Image (tube, rainbow, N blue to C red):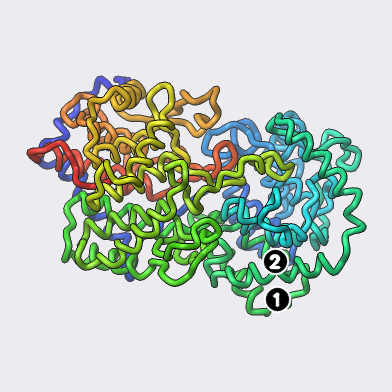
Amino acid sequence: MVPDAAIAHPDPTDPGPGGTLDSVIDESRNWLLDRQREDGHWVFELEADATIPAEYILLNHYLDEIDDDTEAKIAVYLRAIQGAHGGWPLFHDGDLNVSASVKAYYALKLVGDDVDAPHMKRAREAILAHGGAAEANVFTRIALALFQQVPWRAVPVMRIEAMLLPKWFFFHFNKVSYWSRTVMVPLLILGTLKPRARNPRGVDVRELFTTPPEQVKKYLDNPTGHWLGEVLLWVDKAARLLEPTFPAFLRDRAIGKALAFIKERLNGDDGLGGIFPAMTNTLMAYDLLGYAKDHPDYVICRQAIDKLLVFRDGMAYCQPCLSPVWDTGLALHALQEAGLHAGDPALDAAARWLQGRQILDVRGDWIARRGDIRPGGWAFQYWNDHYPDVDDTAVVAMALHRADPARYKDAIDRAVEWILGMQSESGGWGAFDADNEFHMLEHIPFADHGALLDPPSVDVTARCLGMLAQLGYTRDHPAVVRGLDYLRRQQEEDGSWFGRWGTNYIYGTWSVLGTLNALGEDMEQPYVRRAVDWLKGRQGADGGWGEDCASYWDDRRGEVKGSTPSQTAWAVLGLMAAGAVDEDCVTRGVDYLTHAPRQGGKWDEDLYNAVGFPRVFYLRYHGYSSYFPLWAVARYRNLKRSNTRATPFGI
């Protein structure tokens, strides 16, 4: 076999027919346009790991709302993604994860898989070899407690009275991230009242424990190793002893406050917080509190959950949430790069759809830190008015400005006002909140997943600065000065930047380099050249770039399973922003993209390309392998055929 690097491909800038740049751009653009919805938006599948589809099955059996047909299709999916190691990973071809594996095994057993079937035997042996179900994380042990598979002492004390704590207290809901808030409020109702799943088929998983679960002496530990973690473990023990003495009137008052919180944010069939875990906890809480199955709030919550299901190829899975605003904003950028201009019906329809989704009236939970600014952002989902996303807002504002700055001026101005107000004291921007950096809370026993907070991140900060640059803000504007200083401080020793919401250092480095270009930064500065050298050094023999999700572990940050179209696109976009348009590294990257396998305008990409929570929860955006490669090759063509190597766009 001839190595990929030795195959002679035609010049990718050749405008002739065949597998050339122009034909790839045209075919990809048309493919993407064909998938635009009638009202103008795009939405692609958003796939996580086995946890979410497994939890869907667990939910049905908790409630005794078993749907054998749907669950059988989910079981096909779960069997298909089982790893060669016997368990289930957090991302494609990843290591076994005990928590995901326990839930997947339990879900398959609930739908009727024989424990002696080869795939179940392999899974059981793999889980036991990794310490058994007792080694699962807190969220998995909560699910097991609800099904009476572990005693409630296997999870931290979770009391709904936390709703009544004052803002000055060590813990307060305003001090955690939006996703933690929406997941925890209904979950604390469950943790306080300790219900039992109906589990009508009486399925257990005792065979997944190396020691009988009631005999396990220690479930809770201090994953951070910090002294405060040890102190809080003792606090948890004391709270467990005192729990029977807590007055009922305080519990009932707190439950009422929690239900009011949920009701205000129920969010129609887009669901509480727009995320699956918050919705499922809410539905179980409603059931526990006696809501009838035809109660309007119960019905709409169930509809929101079922709306996340995907059916294809004889299988089904449940998405963690929906991504239409994000997909539409990014698709619009790619299509405009590929030649769509104002007046094009597809572009105008997408821009109008986005304009109609702006949140202008609801003052969401972000007011806890920024109560003096007006709303003006966009959510990630169809609707999620209490939780607009800073990253989405910057992307959409740039797309609208590019489409027609005059027509969408009011929407853009409100977005800028909101984003400027959401800048944190550090100079960076978080995804949903400002100054959400109460890191001491990461030591509470409940927080073993390490994703309790929403601090500023490099990629979101770069996007906000890119938006400001595109709109004419210069490097001497106070917000830009602080933001750039934040980015410089966050650069890694090797020259890269960490990618909080995309995998990983390639994503973060592209985000920053694109912003620096847009701001007119001197791209020959040493810190910029270190980033460029890092990107060049990561290029594969096939001309592409790849980075494994395992890079979120410090000791595995160099791992690569193979090149991917989306990560190659980010690298090419970053290098072009740094002025390397005419260099061999970019030419080879574009060559990789023009010849990589694809189906129309969707490049083949099985490896995961994003992250929900590093080392805990990973994502595969199915749209990334469509609009990002198109964006990169179209920008390459535009820059090669222009008289400048700079771009006026902030992304």
Which residue is located at x 32 percent, y 25 percent? 527
| Image side of residue 252 versus residue 346, left or right | right
**Furthest residue toward left:** 643
Kindly indicate the quadrant of the structure image that contains residue 489. Answer: top left
* Secondary element at tag 1: loop
How far across and how far down the image is residue 11, in percent? 14, 31
Badge 2 element: helix
What residue sits 28% from the left and 67% below the top?
Answer: 410
- Label 2: which residue? 258
Q: Is residue 309 above or below residue 86?
A: below
Q: Amino acid at mark 2?
A: Ala
Which circle marks residue 293 in the picture?
A: 1
User: Considering depth in this image, is 45 or 407 the residue closer to the camera?
Assistant: 407
What kind of residue is marked 1? Lys
Q: Is residue 520 left or right of residue 364?
A: left
What residue is drawn where x is 55% and y is 42%?
Answer: 613
- Mark on residue 591? none
Residue in front for this viewpoint, 314 or 211: 211
Residue 52 position (above or below residue 233): below
Which callout, 2 or 1, points at the residue further toward the start of the chain?
2
Judged by depth in the image, the label closer to the viewer, 2 or 1, is 2
